[in-house]
Image: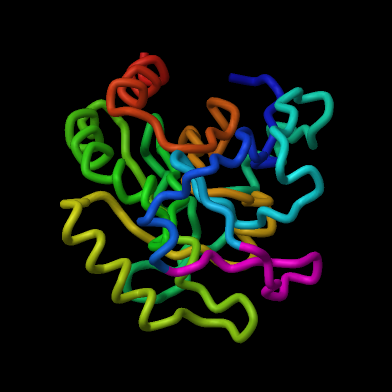
């Protein structure tokens, strides 16, 4: 698709009164201010997604999804996404392009070890990745809360949590860890957030905030592969 897309990852729901236990009892996502330093914010996590920065202006109201009111990204800028680096499972820097190359469709799923909805959908994401892998589809799970955005490097205690979650959920698709550059570029505000890209890094859909059912994800994947 050659239409203009947006990489502002917006909060699209009103905070629910009941908060999920899975989100309350685990690690908080890093809160970044404009300078890229970790900021202190109140807790705010919903049933379908967990907020990374709930104190954005209008955080208690649904944000608009009108592309004219968001930052539009050209095809050339979209391709910059896969030129950014992440940390691989061996804690080495690696470009996103290395994960995307050769795939017709790559599902980039941003998740956190503190996020119950993220973890709940990982088992069936793993099933879908196996089912459609031979059709040119792969998933890349990008962990958002293992990186120390103030001091640099990765945090061993969160890495262990991520490893345990991956083992328990049966995930076999690639897992990596977000860099500060990636978080700032995508303006990530909530997890799970999912991007679908082609092998050149062009966005195939608008960014999708929140978890979905296995059936919903499968319909999206099938349509993109056709």
Query: Eyeballing the image, is 70 above or below 165?
Result: above
Along the line of sight, the residue nearer the viewer: 203 or 111? 111
Q: Residue at x 38, y 75 (%)?
A: 158
List x then y, in percent, for residue 41. 68, 66
Residue in the picture at 39% in, 65% down = 25
Residue 221, percent from left and from top: 36, 24
Foreground residue, 82 or 221?
221
Q: Residue at x 23, y 32 (%)?
A: 128
Q: Is residue 122 above or below residue 96?
A: above
Residue 167 horizontal/vertical position (percent) = 17, 61
Q: Which of 138 and 180 lies nearest the eye of the viewer?
A: 180
Work out whether 91 lies above or below 53.
Answer: below
Q: Quadrant of residue 226?
A: top left
User: What secondary structure predominates along the stretch shown in magenta?
Assistant: loop
* Extreme-front residue of the structure: 17
Instruction: Indicate the position of residue 14 as horizontal and vertical percent values.
Output: 63, 36
Q: Relative to the observer, which residue lies in front, 47 or 163?
A: 47
Range covered by the magenta-colored residues:
27-42
Q: Magenta includes 32?
A: yes
Q: Is residue 57 left or right of residue 19?
A: right
Residue visible at 54% across and 40% down in the picture? 16
Q: Is residue 147 magenta?
A: no
Q: How many marks?
A: 0
Q: How is the image coloured?
A: rainbow
Which quadrant would the N terminus be assigned to in this image? Answer: top right
């Amino acid at each position: 698709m050659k239409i203009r897309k947006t990489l502002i990852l917006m909060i699209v729901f009103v905070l629910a009164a009941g908060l999920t236990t899975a989100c309350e009892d685990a690690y908080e996502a890093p809160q970044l201010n404009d300078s890229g330093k970790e900021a202190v914010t109140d807790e705010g996590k919903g049933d379908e997604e967990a907020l990374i920065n709930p104190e954005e202006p209008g955080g208690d109201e649904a944000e608009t999804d009108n592309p004219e009111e968001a930052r539009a990204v050209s095809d050339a800028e979209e391709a910059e996404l896969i030129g950014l680096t992440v940390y691989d499972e061996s804690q080495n820097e690696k470009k996103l392009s290395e994960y995307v190359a050769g795939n017709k469709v790559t599902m980039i799923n941003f998740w956190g070890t503190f996020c119950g909805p993220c973890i709940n959908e990982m088992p069936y994401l793993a099933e879908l990745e196996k089912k459609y892998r031979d059709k040119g589809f792969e998933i890349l799970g990008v962990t958002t809360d293992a990186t120390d955005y103030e001091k640099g490097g990765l945090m061993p205690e969160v890495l262990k949590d991520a490893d345990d979650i991956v083992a328990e959920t049966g995930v076999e698709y690639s897992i990596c860890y977000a860099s500060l550059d990636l978080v700032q570029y995508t303006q990530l505000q909530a997890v799970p957030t999912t991007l679908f890209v082609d092998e050149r890094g062009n966005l195939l859909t608008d960014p999708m905030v929140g978890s979905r059912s296995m059936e919903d994800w499968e319909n999206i994947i099938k349509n993109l592969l056709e």
